[in-house]
Amino acid sequence: MLEGKLALVAGVANRRSIAWAIAQALHAAGARCAFTYQGERLEKTVRELAASVDSDVVVPCDVRSDADLDRAFGEVAAGLGGLDILVHAIAFAQAHDLQGRFVDTARDDFWLALDVSAYSLTAMARRAEPLMAARGGGSIVTMTYLGGERAVPRYNVMGVAKAALESSVRYLAADLGPANIRVNAVSAGPVRTLAARSIPGFATMEEMVAERSPLKRNIDAADVAKTAVYLLDAENVTGTIAYVDAGYHAMGM
Ligand code: NAP
């Protein structure tokens, strides 16, 4: 389906990461993947995972740094020979902000969460634009959660960041559409990953999805990957958010 496409996957921390499930699905669909990771402690894991999908283009990138982003996009473009696909699966908030009340969020912590979890999509899209335009277009997908639309207990500042991320998807789709670059998001239900473990009450979120969603079950990272690949491939879909949550978002109670 994506034979010969060149993809950058950002946000693999380990084999449970949603980004890793998407990378595997991209590889199965015929795409060639490059990876960015944050910090030396992740390098060995990400290199080993990358090797298992025949990739050796693995570069460090902390999305808070413009210099890092510039270098990483340069190395990825050189390593792959271009860019057609960007997978953005990155988010961060201070652990203390994922408990207690949103109203108590400090200014610095607010900006940190918004910077890493929302602005980084725009920063990456801007660097991807010329590379994708040079190949006649491209496709970008990011990861969001229902907490960006509704007040989910303890999701707090991350929900505000997801609201900014979802709005960014629409504005980026409008800006980049004329260059045939599409921008979409998957809104995923709870999936057990490293980031998810830092959300207190995560198990309760899973229980509620199993109890109240139309399909009465939880989803996994492979389900998210399937829809991400669909969005990356769907040539006339842009500016949209696809829910992969067993239908939970459709329920009033
Ligand atoms: P994950 O495996 O922990 O992935 C999150 C990634 O973000 C990690 O690789 C993390 O690296 C990276 N990251 C954090 N700060 C960064 C920075 N400054 N620069 C570069 N990378 C940075 O968790 P995940 O659940 O797969 O999360 C992927 C995306 O899916 C996130 O946007 C998350 O909000 C979204 N999502 C997850 C769920 C869920 O239930 N799991 C549901 C809906 C949406 P470090 O490990 O080094 O911090």
Image (tube, rainbow, N blue to C red):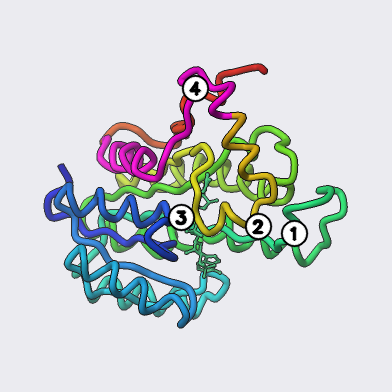
Image point (29%, 37%), residue name: 230
Residue numbers of the magenta segment: 209-234
Quadrant in the rendering for residue 195: bottom right
Three-letter amino acid code of the residue under disc 2: Leu
What is the x, y in percent for residue 70?
Answer: 43, 76
As drawn, 172 above or below 205? below
Label 1 element class: helix
**Quadrant of the image containing the N terminus:** top left
Measuring from the top left, give residue 176's x and y in whole percent.
40, 48
Residue at (26%, 36%) from the top-left corner?
235
Is label 1 in contact with label 4 (beta carbons under 8 Å)?
A: no
Q: Quadrant of residue 130?
A: bottom left
Asked whether 83 or 171 is in front, the reply is: 83
* Marking on residue 216: 4
Q: Magenta segment: does it hold 107? A: no
**Distance of label 3 from label 1 (alpha carbons):** 19 Å
Marks 1 and 4, the one that precedes in the sequence: 1
Of badges 1 and 4, the one in the foreground is 4
Q: Are marks 3 and 2 in contact (CB under 8 Å)?
A: no
Q: Marks 1 and 2: CB-CB under 8 Å?
A: yes
Cα gap from disc 2 to disc 4, whole angstroms: 32 Å
Compared with residue 36, is residue 199 higher up or lower down, i.e. above or below? above
In the rendered view, does 191 fall on the left or right side of 80? right
Residue type, label 4 = Lys
Dominant SS in magenta:
helix
* Left or right of residue 186: residue 98: right
Q: Position of residue 126 (x, y in %)?
A: 44, 61
Q: CA distance from mark 1 to mark 2?
A: 6 Å
Question: From the viewer's perspective, is the residue at label 2 or at label 4 nearer?
Answer: 4
Q: Which residue is mark 2?
A: 114
Crowd tier of the residue under label 3, counting other residues whose Cα lies within 10 Å: few below 14, some 14–19, many 20 or above: many
The residue beneath circle 1 is 110
